[in-house]
Amino acid sequence: EVRLMESGGGLVQPGGSLRLSCAASGFSVSQWYMSWVRQPPGKGLEWISGIDTGDDYTTYLDSVKGRFTISRDNAKNTVILQLNSLKTEDTAMYYCQRGDGRRGQGTQVIVSA
């Protein structure tokens, strides 16, 4: 069974950091394009970052470029999103997503003073 389980969210002050993890089972993250998407309160889903197979080429939404870093740990079958210099507008439910659109249950990130 394919499963994606996100963790690491929480409440953080502006300027703070969080490390989100996506533990996968039922498939190998190394063989799929993996991404992170988020859904701010009252808004739609927004793609924020992706990592390709093979060369691990990464891409980012402009508003998170330089602050967020996506990576993949093939040994742990996990995809990581490091969030630095967080802003209030980063408040959202964050989801790990496989290339075919399958997502986990999400992890909540709240950035507030």
Image (tube, helix red, strand yellow):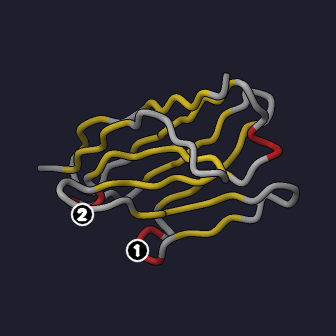
Q: Position of residue 50 (x, y in %)?
A: 62, 60
Mark 2: which amino acid? Glu
Q: Position of residue 52 (x, y in %)?
A: 75, 59
Residue 12 screen position, x and y as percent:
25, 43
Residue 66 vs residue 106, the one in the foreground = 106
Q: Determine the CA span between mark 2 and mark 1.
A: 10 Å
> Pointers 2 and 1 in contact (CB under 8 A)?
yes
**Location of the N terminus (image quadrant):** top right
Outermost residue to the left: 113
- Residue 41 is left or right of residue 5, and the answer is left
Determine crowd level at label 1: few under 14, some 14-19, many 20+ residues with C-alpha closer than 10 A. few
Q: Residue at x 47, y 77 (%)?
A: 62
Task: Kindly indicate the quadrant of the structure image that contains residue 59.
Answer: bottom right
Judged from the image, the secondary structure of the residue bearing numbered disc 1 is helix
Check disc 1 and report the residue beneath it.
63
Q: What amino acid is found at the position of numbered circle 1 in the picture?
A: Ser
Pick whichever, 113 or 102, lies toward us. 102
| Residue bearing mark 2 | 89
Kindly identify the residue that appears in the image at 66 percent across and 49 percent down. 71
Q: Residue at x 72, y 54 (%)?
A: 33
Task: Decide which of tag 2 and tag 1 comes sooner along the chain.
Answer: 1
Residues 70 and 48: in front is 48
Q: For this view, does 102 lie left or right of residue 62? A: right
Give the residue at the far bottom of this rendering. Answer: 62
